[in-house]
Amino acid sequence: MKHEHLSIDIETFSDVDIGKCGLFKYVDTDAFEILLFAYSYDFGLVHVVDMTKGEIIPADVLQDLADPGVIKHAYNAAFEITCLNRAGYRTPPDQWRCTMLHGLYLGYPAGLANLGKALGLPEDKRKMAAGKALIRYFCVPCKATKKNGGRHRNRPVHDPDKWKTFKAYNAQDVVTEMADYQRLMAYPVPGWVQEDWVIDYELNRRGIQLDMDLVKGAIAIDGDYRSALIEKAIRITGLRNPNSRNQLLAWLNENTDLELEKLTKETVAESLQVASGDAEEVLRIRKNLSKSSVTKYQAMDRALCSDGRIRGVLQCYGANRTGRWAGRLVQVQNLPHDVPQAIATARHLVKSKNRRGLELMYGDVASTLSQLIRTAFIAPDDAMLCVSDFSAIEARVLSRLAGEKWRMDVFANNGDIYCASASSMFGVPVVKHGVNGHLRQKGKVAELALGYQGGPNALISMGALKMGLMEDELPDIVRRWRASNPRIQDFWYAVDGAAMSVMQNAQPVGLPHGIIFSRECNLLYGYDYLTVTLPSGRRLFYPQPYVGENQFGRPAIHYKTQMGANWVYTSTYGGKLVENITQAIARDCLALALKRLVQHGYKLLMHIHDEVVLEVPKDQLHDDEIDRINAIMCDPIPWAPGLILNADGFISPYYKKD
């Protein structure tokens, strides 16, 4: 009998902490092994193969792992794919379907237990609560004690009853995954989104090389620098531990003119404006000690695989409201933007572990180390990194959706929207790297903050005050930005009206450019969704929606989402829906560009927001290589005719901000 579906869950052992080091480092150790292999054909009876007892995976299952005619299912399928291939069982990623991706696509939370709870699975279908304790017992090293005979690992023989329960847990995970899938399958993941997931898996599997001399140098310099700061603080204060918040707060209140209720990043910054002498010096030391300038370096060091590359830094559909990617391990989506002067010199000093030289040339050691984080990602000796970045893609997408002609003219004439907005706001010409160029960043902040119905607080959260704007001028900036973008304002209200109409009448409402609001229900299980069909055909899902009062006492759409550990209701509004739609369309543009680059034979290493990083062998580099890549990035989008894209790029032996 030919089977169509094979559902799988495995339990494994490794001496590497997967949470801190990631999946690919987890399997990159001689200690890695598969303990249990649970499977089910066509959503039927679950079988468990106990590989610790010499049981082997049946021959037909091994054959089906590589059979394109059999769809393999798992929750977080990347884990099963990676572990099975590492153990010698070949199974291509494009033959798998990930139930985690499916749940995220429909707006549900990550985590098998969380998903089952959100879907309302009956108790007999839910993940067993005892799983975490069993995993700690059998899947990770244990501390050697006299009681356990000095062993570093628990095996089945050490607690047969627990092992029996663990096998039941392994089987139950397959039951839960199958129940989840059957409740989600009414709304399948589009085929091209599934292809995005495969591209993402291959990208993560390929990884990117790290400059470990820089990583080790940064960690060493930071340790030396922090020790020097603490010694200096001890000399000034006489405290045993001046890095203690409570000790330092008491010293400041007893020995200086400052009167502080608490010691936070904000109060330190405020106090530095008025402090002098020892108080100023101690506060400055506190500020520098609080900077986490090497956290990402430490994450790189932990996650480094044996071949010098780091893997698994991105998660497909990590932001499940829009479908954008999320950073993992090093969190590449929030790398520092600032660049040190004479970057090659700074890198040399760090790689040489020359803390005194770095401090002499740059002053602020912590900030300089932070600014160099990007450059820890490097190309191998025989290759170069090619980096290409969409220019202001969210602004371009929003302008097209709203039909704001003057903005589209700026893009059509290859202008700079941030300069154009700054020019409009401040009434002077603004040229990037030219006249009034310092105002461009303020225009960019306004563009990023105000396009989605934000007000003064949105400007503040985007850093307006830190850039020199005064709080009392922010309302006027909001007013002038909105006055110059009336069609964008209209679009906020059109989107809000369409969503509210669908909620009240249950009839689809279409907007220009192929955007459709709908109410969709799975009557079998009682699931209800507000959906937004995007121009690409992908949909955004807002589960279990209803209309009720928001915190301002106004009617608003509420829907369920994951907040921390809780599956709760939150509300939305026109501008927020526009943000979701705009960012989702920008994501789809990037996804298509990634696919096209792969089709042209390029090796994707990672992408950060709207920027792609490729590894190209030196003997294949053409003089116009970056122009070719930019052209592929900007090829017309079939489902977004008239969307004007632009991309800039550069070639470098290491990653940086151009």
Image: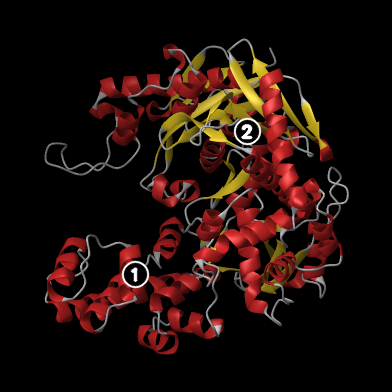
Helix, strand, or loop for circle 2? Answer: helix
In the image, residue 407 above or below residue 526? below
Expressed as whole percent of the image width and height from the top left, the position of residue 143 reads 22, 44
Helix, strand, or loop for circle 1? Answer: helix
> Residue at horizontal 83%, vertical 67%?
414
Q: Amino acid at mark 1?
A: Glu
In the image, residue 345 above or below residue 374? below
Q: Nearer the viewer, residue 296 or 66?
A: 296
> Residue at horizontal 55%, vertical 56%?
456
Q: Residue furthest top?
A: 524
> Residue at horizontal 85%, vertical 61%?
409
Which image quadrant for residue 350? bottom left
Q: Nearer the viewer, residue 409 or 189?
A: 409
Expressed as whole percent of the image width and height from the top left, the position of residue 7 reads 57, 23
Q: Is residue 69 visible?
A: no
Expressed as whole percent of the image width and height from the top left, the position of residue 317 reads 60, 41
> Residue at horizontal 21%, vertical 41%?
151
- Would residue 372 appear left or right of 538 to someone viewing this image? left
Which mark is in front, 1 or 2? 1
Q: Nearer the viewer, residue 489 or 168?
A: 489
- The residue carrying pointer 2 sits among few (fewer than 14), some (14 to 19) or many (20 or more) residues within 10 Å by Cα, namely many
Please tell me the numbered disc located at residue 232: none
**Earlier-in-chain disc, 1 versus 2:** 2
- The reply to whether discs 1 and 2 touch (Cβ–Cβ < 8 Å) is no
Q: Quadrant of the C terminus?
A: bottom right
- The residue carrying pointer 1 sits among few (fewer than 14), some (14 to 19) or many (20 or more) residues within 10 Å by Cα, namely few
Residue matched to label 2: 105
Please tell me the numbered disc located at residue 270: 1
Q: Amino acid at mark 2?
A: Tyr
Expressed as whole percent of the image width and height from the top left, the position of residue 256 reads 17, 76
